[in-house]
Image (cartoon, grey):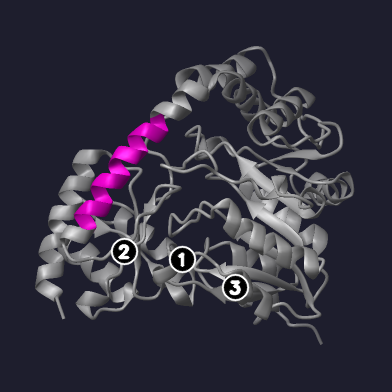
């Protein structure tokens, strides 16, 4: 007998928890006057010259399928970009795959490399989708705890402790969502040594690579010996304010890209052609806009971190992405209770740290990709809330 209509859902899907973020967005939609520091996307609109390239594509009738791999013109621009920024050389014909957002690239990577029961080592806290990607591909997550006293940097020794005979890969997302942590080159080199010793693949989610402040981004695949064992995932959503365009990519050795493309061709066929043409324009002429947005984020970053510390929510300095991850332990509230009460009492939306893993409990994620006056008002309301609930 099969599962039947009374229980039609697969065990893999049942094993995935509902998003810890979604219910807050549902609540926000039903309330007026809410200031949201919850949504992890730029408040900037896509730079006009990029949008214009997409509009031009539609006007000229570019509304058809592309190659499963994506437009060769875009793949060449991606290859040029990776070489100029990180010294990485990828063949645009066989080693780059254009995807429908970096999210699809991560999903494809997991499905391409994992067999049932294999394990993926993932630092905790991390992006909410990493665990579901792993489970849907038949894998198991081995979380690596990280802590505020280390600025939430994963320690190579702690990663190595979680490696077993079933470990297939590690998934790294730095600059990090939700903490804003950036790994320096030395940090990554130590992790790379673990990958080398245990013959592990590395999926490196570098969607926030351009959003770093007072430091530089180290591309994992550019470390010695790592290109051949790394699936580099990136996209256009964050740096170019193109979240709704849904355009990303993966770069990896050709046999891995070919395996990912096999899944991609059946699930997605190709990324939208107009979004691909907009992405070409972004890579060719978008640098000035990126630098302008990064400078603005940096100003907001310094403002919100100081503000959070001033009101008693201890916050280490995030050096990447656009998130602050303050401790709310001084209130005695759990992360979830804090967020629910803050939303109801002061109409401020933030995300509980527990949504990103067990080590996120006691913290909240505040996105500062929000207009500065809104951040200022949010901090005033949070100050009032913290004074009221101080343990």
Identity of the residue furthest to the top in this view: 60
Q: Residue beneath label 3, please?
A: 16
| Mark nearer the viewer, 1 or 3 | 1
Secondary structure beneath dot 1 equals: loop
- Which label's residue is closer to the chain start, 1 or 3? 3
Is-magenta flag for residue 237? no
342 lies left or right of 21: left
**x 45%, y 48%: residue:** 320
In the rendered image, residue 145, in percent from the top left (x then y), is placed at: 52, 75
**x 60%, y 46%: residue:** 218
In the rendered image, residue 65, in percent from the top left (x then y), is placed at: 77, 30
Q: Residue beneath label 2, please?
A: 326
In the rendered image, residue 311, in percent from the top left (x then y), is placed at: 16, 61
Secondary structure beneath dot 2 equals: loop
Give the main secondary structure, helix, strand or loop, of the magenta stretch.
helix
- Which label's residue is closer to the chain start, 3 or 2? 3
Above or below, 197 relative to 317: below
Above or below, 228 relative to 285: below
Identity of the residue furthest to the bottom in this view: 1
């Amino acid at each position: 007998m099969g599962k039947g209509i009374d229980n039609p859902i697969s065990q893999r899907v049942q094993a995935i928890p509902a998003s810890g973020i979604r219910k807050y967005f549902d609540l926000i939609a039903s309330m007026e006057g809410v200031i949201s520091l919850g949504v992890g996307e730029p408040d900037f609109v896509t730079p006009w010259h990029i949008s214009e390239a997409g509009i031009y594509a539609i006007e000229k009738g570019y509304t058809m399928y592309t190659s499963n791999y994506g437009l060769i013109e875009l793949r060449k621009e991606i290859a040029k970009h990776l070489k100029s920024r990180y010294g990485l050389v990828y063949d645009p014909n066989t080693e780059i795959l254009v995807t429908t957002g970096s999210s699809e690239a991560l999903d494809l990577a997991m499905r391409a490399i994992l067999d049932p029961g294999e394990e993926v080592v993932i630092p905790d806290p991390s992006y909410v989708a990493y665990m579901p990607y792993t489970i849907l591909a038949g894998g198991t997550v081995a979380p690596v705890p990280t802590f505020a006293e280390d600025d939430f940097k994963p320690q190579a020794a702690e990663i190595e402790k979680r490696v077993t005979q079933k470990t297939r890969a590690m998934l790294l997302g730095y600059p990090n969502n939700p903490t804003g942590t950036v790994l320096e080159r030395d940090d990554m080199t130590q992790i790379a040594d673990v990958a080398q010793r245990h013959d592990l693949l590395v999926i490196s989610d570098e969607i926030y690579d351009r959003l770093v402040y007072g430091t530089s981004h180290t591309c994992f695949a550019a470390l010695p010996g790592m290109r051949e064992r790394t699936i580099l995932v990136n996209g256009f959503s964050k740096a170019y304010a193109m979240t709704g365009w849904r355009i990303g990519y993966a770069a990896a050795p050709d046999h891995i890209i070919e395996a990912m493309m096999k899944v991609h061709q059946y699930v997605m066929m190709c990324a939208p052609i107009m979004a691909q043409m907009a992405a070409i324009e972004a890579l060719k002429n978008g640098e000035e806009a990126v630098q302008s947005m990064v400078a603005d984020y940096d100003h907001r970053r310094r403002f919100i971190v100081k503000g959070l510390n001033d009101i008693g929510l201890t916050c280490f300095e995030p050096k990447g992405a656009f998130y602050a991850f303050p401790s709310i332990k001084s209130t005695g509230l759990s992360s979830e209770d804090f967020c629910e009460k803050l939303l109801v009492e002061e109409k401020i939306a933030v995300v509980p740290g527990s949504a990103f893993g067990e080590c996120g409990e006691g913290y909240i994620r505040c996105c500062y990709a929000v207009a500065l006056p809104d951040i200022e008002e949010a901090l005033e309301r949070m100050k009032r809330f913290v004074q009221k609930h101080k343990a």
